[in-house]
Image (cartoon, coloured by chain):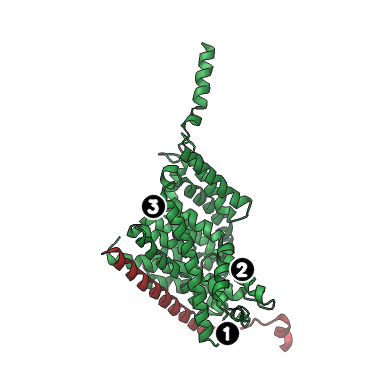
Amino acid sequence: MDDTTFGLTLTVLGMSGTLVSLGILSLLIAGLKKIYPFEPEKTAASKGKGN
Amino acid sequence: MLLESILASLEALISGLGQFSWQQVVMIVIGCVLMYLGIGKGLEPLLLVPIGFGAILVNVPFSGVMEEHGFLRVMYDGGILTELFPILIFVGIGAMTDFGPLLANPRILLFGAAGQFGIFLTLLLALALGFTKLEALAIGIIGACDGPTAIYVTTNYAPHLLGSVSVAAYSYMALVPILQPPIMRLLTTDKEKRIVMASVKSTVSKKTRLIFPILVTGFTAIVAPLGVPLMGMLMLGNLFREAPGLERLAKTSANELANIVTLMLGLTIGATMAAEQFLRIETLGIFALGLVAIGLDTVMGVLFGKLMCVLTGGKVNPLVGAAGISALPMAARVVQMEGQRYNKKNHLLMHAMGANTGGQVGSIMAAAIMLSIVNAMGIL
């Protein structure tokens, strides 16, 4: 394989591969956040309200 | 008789002086300059000082530090050739890194991809300048702005360039606050620089933080398995940080382990800077290409930021794109300072930290993808 073909193939596939991979990873993280949403910790005062 | 004996002994004692070549003297001066940059200017002192000192030691005639059984040779064979040092240092980096800002806004991970484009564009330039395919890979990886990744790739594919690639990578990482601002200013309008981004809310559950390292490792194993040693160790360190009951491991990884490995890594990289290997015309080319790589990372990051700005209807400040590299946390601080320079009420730090930690993940992912493609091509 000549250098130009090697370089261009690697550049196109590398850039798009990195972008797509991290794009999918960001979607997976967003999904993870949906499955385990943030719940603010109850403060001691609010925990004691019922007592 | 006694006098002759004393003179002969004295001659033996100072025999090393006569053996100094001008190239070794130049390398010792370079070692001193690296130490000055570290100590005097505060640029990556933890690395530049051991590297500089290693460079001095290896260029002293008859020091034997890199000959068989020499102590630096033993460390080099055991830690660099085996890839152990760059891998272990990622455990420490993982334990030190808070991925919270990235997890709060996962979309910002895309900046970590754009910030790696310099790797590939520099690879093209290196090929055009006549470097071999494997050398071009090693030179391009300087654009990852990630010392351990650069060492890992170079050790595997162009070990004869290890000294110049590593020193270029660490030196330019330290120079990010000087290299990036002119490019950021040039590529953005005053209106863009003043864009205020919504504050990052800490809305990440503990379970998300715990699963994140496992998810990223598993994803890397599927997409680019060659990156698993680096990404796996980065994420292991982060798991130590986030998991309950592992505080001791997290503390050890972030402090003792990271410090010890940094010391040995720096010294052994310095030891690869023997005059006959380092003082070549191609070293100048590598340094020039490394500079281009980091410049291109910044250009592509900011341009991607501009695209995100348009796509989000002006909600993203393009300056944040410059933080999508692995130089943590310098690049994020640069973005914060540049943002405040044009709008005192602008606080971009948390967004930039998200992009910066995304750059950490992105640099390993880009290197892993690059190596997987090369492997698939049958070049290796």
In front: B262, or B176?
A: B176
User: In percent of the image, x 44 and y 41: which residue is there?
Assistant: B66
- Give x and y (percent) for residue B238: 53, 67
| Colour chosen for chain A | red
**Callout 2 amino acid:** Arg
Q: Chain of mark 2?
A: B
- Give x and y (percent) for residue B145: 49, 63
User: In percent of the image, x 32 and y 65: which residue is there?
Assistant: B374
As helix, strand or loop, the secondary structure at mark 2 comes to: helix
Mark 3 vs mark 1: give the one in front: 1
All told, the count of numbered labels is 3
**Callout 3 amino acid:** Pro
Q: CA distance from mark 2 to mark 3?
A: 33 Å
**Callout 1 amino acid:** Lys
Q: Chain of mark 3?
A: B
**Residue B16 visible in the current orientation:** yes
Residue wearing tag 2 = B333
Question: Looking at the image, which residue sits at the far left?
Answer: A1
State the green chain. Answer: B
Task: Tell me, for residue B122, which label it has, or none.
Answer: none
Which numbered disc, 3 or 1, marks the residue that appears first in the sequence? 3
Sort mark 3 into few (<14), some (14-19) or many (20+) by Cα contacts within 10 Å.
some
**Residue A51 visible in the current orientation:** no
Residue wearing tag 3 = B159
